[in-house]
Amino acid sequence: MQGHEWLAERFEEQRAHLRAVAYRMLGSLPEAEDAVQECWLHVSRADTSDVANLGGWMTTVLARVCLDALRARRTRREETMDAPALEPAASAEDGTDPEHEALLADLVGHALLVVLDRLTPAERVAFVLHDVFAVPFEEIAPIVARSPAAARQLASRARRRVQGAGGVPEVDRTRQRAVVEAFLAAARGGDLSALLGLLDPEVVVRADPAAVALGAEPEVRGVEAVARTYLGRARGARLALVNGAVGAVWAPGGRPRVAFAFTVMGGRIVEVRLLAQHLPGLGVTILED
């Protein structure tokens, strides 16, 4: 068995990823934090000497914790019949940061959370793990107590319901990455035509106060204005995961200063959020270009 201190260090390396998984499954930052903490309790008591992929195994443990939480939530709603579609935002009194909660909700997309909340617990787990985090169905199957083929059907059914709701952000990382990479390439190359084709006509760029203090405009609206804002720029931006979704980060000297969170719908960018506050809590991970 690995030493407790070594295991704790490996868990901390995975914490941002685990929180991103839990938040997408549960839709509530306090619940996500509780799930990650419960995951650690399971991990800390386990024999990990035979675990080949520690990060993947931790994700599996967390997924089971989230599945139990979703089932318990569903039972409570069936009993009360009047539970809200989403957990209310946390207040400062309960120890969480409401601004951070709202920021994470923006990244995931309120519309997507509402749709996910209408899925069965098993559908939600299968969809989030596979479509958002690219976990193979062979690994999802034992979590939801189904065969790989049945787990695939769960995710497919959930995907149809999400897509059928309309107006929800793109959640597939491969498609997210293609759009973000194309945007960065067009911006750096000064390709106005390509930029215009990648941006929604009503696109908006919003910057938080810390990003504004670094020189960003608080808000830029419209395809022409946004395209010209980034034309010939973004040379210092690097592709990154921002709370589990593909985005970008400005990291002079390798130190992240501003994260760029993209909302993609129908293959076009509808919103960009420039985030300089709470960067450690957003789980920013720079990707290889």
Image: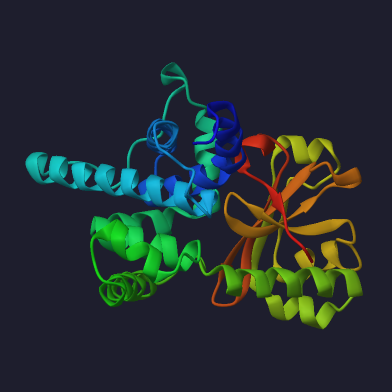
Q: How far across and how far down the image is residue 235, in percent?
A: 90, 61
Considering only vertical position in the picture, is 194 above or below 51? below
Residue 120 shows in this picture: yes
Left or right: 153 as drawn, with respect to 60:
left
Q: Residue at x 61, y 33 (%)?
A: 9
Left or right: 223 as drawn, with respect to 96:
right
Q: Residue furthest top?
A: 93
Left or right: 23 as drawn, with respect to 16:
left
Q: How far across and how far down the image is residue 90, in percent?
A: 41, 29
Q: Of residues 211 and 42, which is closer to you in this image?
A: 42
> Which part of the image, by quadrant, shows the C terminus?
bottom right
Q: Residue at x 39, y 74 (%)?
A: 163
Q: How far across and how far down the image is residue 56, in percent?
A: 49, 54
| Tally of numbered tags | 0
Q: Of residues 151 and 219, which is closer to you in this image?
A: 151
Q: How far across and how far down the image is residue 74, in percent?
A: 18, 47
Residue 82 shows in this picture: no
Specify the color scheme: rainbow
Q: Residue at x 83, y 62 (%)?
A: 229
Q: Of residues 139 and 25, which is closer to you in this image?
A: 139
Q: Residue at x 44, y 69 (%)?
A: 136
